[in-house]
Amino acid sequence: MEIQDRLFEIINQMNAPQKEATMAINGPIQVIAGAGSGKTRVLTTRVAYLIYSGVEPSEILALTFTNKAANEMKERIANILNHSLANRVWAGTFHSIFARILRIEAEEIGYNRDFTIYDQEDSLSLIRQIMKDNNVTSNEMSPQSVQHTISRAKNEMINALDYARVAQTTYEKKIAQLYLNYQDELYRSKAMDFDDLLLNTLDLFVSNKTILEKYQQKFRYILVDEFQDTNKPQYRIVWNLAKAHSNIFVVGDDAQSIYRWRGAEIKNILNFTKDFPAAKQIRLEQNYRSTTAILDAAHSVIQNNRNQIPKKLWTENEFGEKTKVIDAENDNEEGSLIAHQIKKIVNEQLNYGDIAILYRTNAQSLIIERSFRTYNIPYRIFGGLSFYQRKEIKDVLAYLRLLLNSNDNISLLRIINEPPRGIGKTTLEHSINYAKNSNVSLFDSLTKADEIEGLQTRAVVTLKNFVKLIQTYKNQLEEKPLDELVTEYLEQTGLFEMYRQIDSTEMTERWNNISQLINDIILFARSNPNQNLSDYLQQISLLTDFDVKQFDGSMVSMMTIHTAKGLEFPVVFITGLEKGLFPIMRGPNNKEEEEEERRLFYVGMTRAKKRLYLTYARQRARFGEYQYQSPSTFLYEIDKNLLDWNDISSKNIKTQTGNFYTKDFGFNKKNPIKQKYFDDEPRQSSYSQLPEDQGYRLGERVIHPFFGEGKVVAMSGQNQNLKLTIDFTSVGRKQIMVAYAKLQKIS
DNA sequence: TAAAAAATCGTTTTT
DNA sequence: CGATTTTTTA
């Protein structure tokens, strides 16, 4: 039989622990899988093997962290078995699988299947709105920090009521009020944010035994990828589902846990053996990906972490080349030295598609992009602003969401005057008040526009027309073919007309994006005849930039290290290895955070198969101003025998763009110190005058004679121009010139 | 009410 | 610096 042949061909090539992990069918299993140890291969082959052994595909639940991982899994299962079997497996991200379950069971928790999923931006708009309602100014607390605090509470499974109960400080009490209002408003809008997708699923399972049993029975076999990155709610959901049959298989690597900041708990790996004492433990320690030189270099870094399960990866691969360090005068030159090196690599043997540029923060991509353009290096950036987060796309989606869920106030407010149709601030204010007083949704209040007090007749007519427009197409949702409905509706709203005003390249691009989206919708409708607009909208609301863009073998890939997790490239550049940037510094030094940064660096290094480059710049522009940088401490942690430090720098290579002394880097002419160094001072002497040597550190607490106590959150400038951004307890964030203010340190 | 000008603020990382 | 939000002006 063909399937059997394909399956066992793969299994026969496996090493002993891989085989064991693949073929142990029942009971709890925990796999600690080092980087590049064939984890994905085990997961997919295991699913195929389960099905081969007679398990019904739809009884298998495979949870991943990215859509990409889920799709790759389905693809590889299909290659062993076939598409119809593979497609019946429930493989997807935590968020998408739970959204799917919530849609089915929506009535149970007071929603319906057309609920809206709010992305981060939607959620932030809502928080802004609520802060305004509560007279909390953005000076008191930033909407982002409110969002962050609420999200963190949710990850800790503290709901709004609990939070309010335990709130102590005035800050916490304010957050509690906002949190309560936020949840209230989400519910009114029949919307959920990302965290709610997890929490509501958990609530559903905990509060309704019948439903939990239904899914326990359904998912007889559960697999979880990247287990080290699960957070509390995720763990609880999986535990609830698995406890009935205990056929649970988790794969993870504590050394690659990089989402602690999002609530991930490495201790879930340890908890697992407590919750499932019978768990079989399997370790995958043979690496098939990298050269010995790269693997050992990565090991020399990660062994500095105290908090980890001890292990040592090994490989049969060749020693290979040592890791190369690129030392650049400034960020511009970093870009051109990389470009230069890439040209060389491509001339020798490899394709652009074999190369990846990884960085700590998205902002770093910009300057590298610039030099790639100068050097004509084709590249593709992954991550950052996704297609679906573009303004014009969000506008279209907001109109479409309203057709399905007229309670969705964020979408309504987004487009009610987009394009401008004369519904301004005052009109809206009256309507919102009316809606509140008569306890109806904003949209419903607009249907009764003539009852709203204080409105001009003209405004009433405009509102009624707007409502009528939405309702007309809402009613046609079932009869009219989707492509016809969408194009006609958006034409009538005037949105198409607005974006068709092609008077600039920017507008042309926006219009092209809209066309692309419409095409996508039409394509979706054709290839999924059983699914409707609601399915489409829910699906895309959980997509990331990565899921939209395709890999292209003719282009260099650029992305953050977080985004690169799970990927591999023959050649990898990790950029910006500087103190303060990587490991990133924000607030006081914290052991836990430093270890997470180190794990992130480890993840980056282990993406490389053949060659690894580490780059840093001695000066870098941040917030429009240049700052001195020193090499990252991580660089010094790498075994010196595995490192080439001095080969590549501006001293040895001439570059087109990065020539330090001739190029204008936007230096501030008002800054004599920098100018001096810039002109003639030898590098070494000024190199010691780094900002951190001037006595102030990020996170340090200081007293200002006027504003009182505060914490240093950012600094810029040198010497007499040294400017500190300080978070004062009394007055919030202020910029202080050290030369003028008499700051006092608190020890 | 809408467009233009000014002010502010941000850089972690993402489903 | 560059994007986004708030304020001003017509």
Image: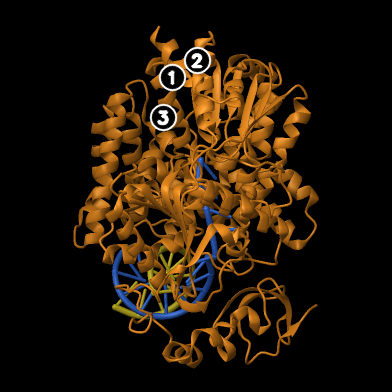
Chain colours: A orange, B blue, C yellow
- Residue A233 position in % (x across, y down): 66, 36
Q: Can residue A56 be seen at all in this image of the molecule?
A: yes
- Residue A136 position in % (x across, y down): 62, 63
In the drawing, what numbered circle is on residue A535? Answer: 3
Q: Secondary structure at mark 3?
A: helix
User: Chain under label 1?
Assistant: A
- Residue A649 position in % (x across, y down): 42, 71
Q: Is residue A235 left or right of residue A445?
A: right
Q: Residues within 10 Å of mark 2 (few under 14, many from 20)?
A: many
Up-down: is A428 above or below A724? above
Specify which label sits upstream in the sequence, 2 or 1.
Answer: 2
Both labels 1 and 3 in a single chain: yes
Q: Tell me if label 1 and label 3 are in contact, CB under 8 Å.
A: no
Name the front one of labels 3 and 2: 2
Q: Secondary structure at mark 2?
A: helix
Work out whether residue A711 or residue A732 is closer to the camera in this orientation and state it.
Answer: A711
| Residue tagged 1 | A86
Specify which label sits upstream in the sequence, 1 or 3.
Answer: 1
When asked about the image quadrant of residue A128, the answer is bottom right
User: Chain under label 3?
Assistant: A
